[in-house]
Amino acid sequence: MTLLLELAFAHIRGRARQTLVAGLGVALGVGFSIAMAALMQGSQDDFVRQLVDSMPHVEITDELRAPAPQPADAAYDAVAYSGLRTSEDLRGILNPTAVMAALEAWVPGTVAPGLRSRALARNAGREAGISILGVEPDREVRVSSVAGDFVFGSFAELAAGGNNVVVGDGLGTLLGAQYGDTIELVASTGQVRSFRISGVFHTGVTARDEGEVYLSLTNAQILAGRPDAVNDIRIRLDDPAAAPGVALRAEALIGYKAVSWQEANEAILEALNVRNVIMYTVVAAILLVAGFGIFNIVSTITFEKSRDIAILKSLGFASADMRRLFLVEGLFIGALGSVLGWAVGYGLCLALGFIRIDIPELGDATSLPLTWSVWHYAISSALAITSAAVAGYLPARRAAALNPVDIIRGAT
Amino acid sequence: MTALIEARNLVRTLPATVPVTLVRDVSLSVEPGEFVALTGPSGSGKSSLLYLLGLLDRPTSGSLSIAGHETGDLDERDRSRLRLSTIGFVFQFHFLLPEFTVRENIEIPMRRLGRLSRPAMRRRAGELLESLGLAGQFDKRPDQLSGGQRQRVAVARALANDPPLILADEPTGSLDSKNSLQVFDILRGLSRDEGKTIVAVTHDLDLAARMDRKLDLVDGRLVADTATAGVAVT
């Protein structure tokens, strides 16, 4: 084998410039693939991280996946109900204390109960429709991403007792109210109560900053007129990736609909997958083009060296040796290009890292999200070497099939 | 002693719309140590027959046995192997690999066979070159040598694996008379002193007359098989 390697290197040395050009073609392909993968993966990771951070990993609501069948429905095929309506809406998770205890027993993370209701916020003649979330402050801190977004105050203020409310800065602007002011909340039952703004947060998501309000769970229950009710249990896991399993188990255990963040964002995650497919298609196309360069050079060598092929065969080399020889040459160019490509890719990533995106509205300048992964290097190299193998194999096969007699005769 | 080459009814036809027959029904047997000339006019099929004997080409029909191996049943790999260990080729042109030094060129068949250790290969290459009057040229590349020197290197390469059979296709065809004689003497010596069997295609009837035996081909057919003087030129 070392003999074949020496022969291959001799051929490549004789075509150093072309080899370098073909290698550079591969290197650029590999380099750009790596940079593109780092950027794609980086932006995807960044996006998913924000997605995961901004919402509970598993959310259990007081809904059922399928409405409970009516007894008559289940008993008789001929019976069908439509437009069925209960006389009074008594929604909420039944027996929340027991449910909470059951979940906390095994969930690897934090579980927080809450009551979600719609209401109206009012101040100085201005009104805004809002969504109230009643929370247990000490648990909420560990579950919600909002805990880290406070401009004034914190969830702890809600625990202190009294009529305190936490609002987004957007809502404050809408209502013309500031930290420390008192606003009125009007429940859907018609009940009106006053609350002092004891905390202001800014998440950057307008819908939340303008439309989300936090009360203590007790206050929320009183305002909604539903004492002891809980209709929203949020779980934050130590490992977000475990969410689908936890959701499945929770749903099987307590019967209510449990939605993991993956399920809630299925469409987005699917779009990300499509994006990845597009990326790898482009990468494969780039490396295919690079493969043509290799094909070209190995082809040239096999034509140029057909006399050597004939003589090696006459000396006692087999066709398989010739095939191996030129395959090795193609692979060598592919490997050379890969290694150069790693450097190119690394350099491009460094360069991209220096780019600052400065949008004044968003405040701080951010750099491009880049994810460094050894897989990007491995995958693009693997594609490059595969392409090189194919590009080398085609001319190698031709070289192996050469009949030495034809060439020796041609020379005389 | 068994024959080194035993050919029976060899036929080689090129498949075409009008098939061309290069070798017609040739049977011959060559004993070890013989120095045989293959002669005939251009296109008489002497080179074609040589390539058949050298396993570079396969006969359309007929059987061929080389050094006791029936070659008809061998696959490409085994034929290559047999060629590597048993047959050395010398062509009209030297066909040395231009990227390698003289010594490396000679080591290539030895390394492919892998019978010797690397230092032993090196030693043997040196000895072969010295015996062919090429001492001091070991590390030159083929293009730094004269035509006669290159052809002698080609002979050394053919001898690398110490094969019993040397096949030569117009080995002196591209050399001037002085170098021709030198190469011829080397072949003569190999046959006489080392017992090599040599089959050489030549159109030079003077040279042919100085070999042991002369085979005449006309139109692909073996028409004459004569014992000749076998006198060395000195």
Image (cartoon, coloured by chain):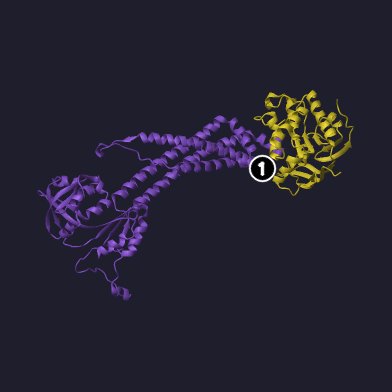
Chain colours: A purple, B yellow
> What residue sits 36% from the left and 52% below the top?
A239
- Please give left or right for residue B209 compared with residue A107 in the image: right
Q: For this rendering, which residue is in front, A341 or A308? A: A341
Is A77 rendered above or below residue B116? Answer: below
Residue B11: image location, x then y, percent: 78, 45
Residue A405 seen in the figure: no
Q: Residue furthest left?
A: A124
Tell me the crowding category of disc 1: few under 14, some 14 to 19, or many 20 or more residues within 10 angstroms, Cα based: many
Residue B28: image location, x then y, percent: 84, 42
Chain name for mark 1: A
Q: Quadrant of residue A31?
A: top left
Q: Secondary structure at mark 1?
A: helix
Q: Quadrant of residue B137?
A: top right
Q: For this rendering, which residue is in front, B76 or B60? A: B76
- Please give left or right for residue A23 compared with residue B189 in the image: left
Is A162 rendered above or below residue B94? Answer: below
Is B169 rendered above or below residue A124? Answer: above
Q: Type of residue at label 1? A: Ser
Q: Quadrant of residue A224?
A: bottom left
Residue of label 1:
A319
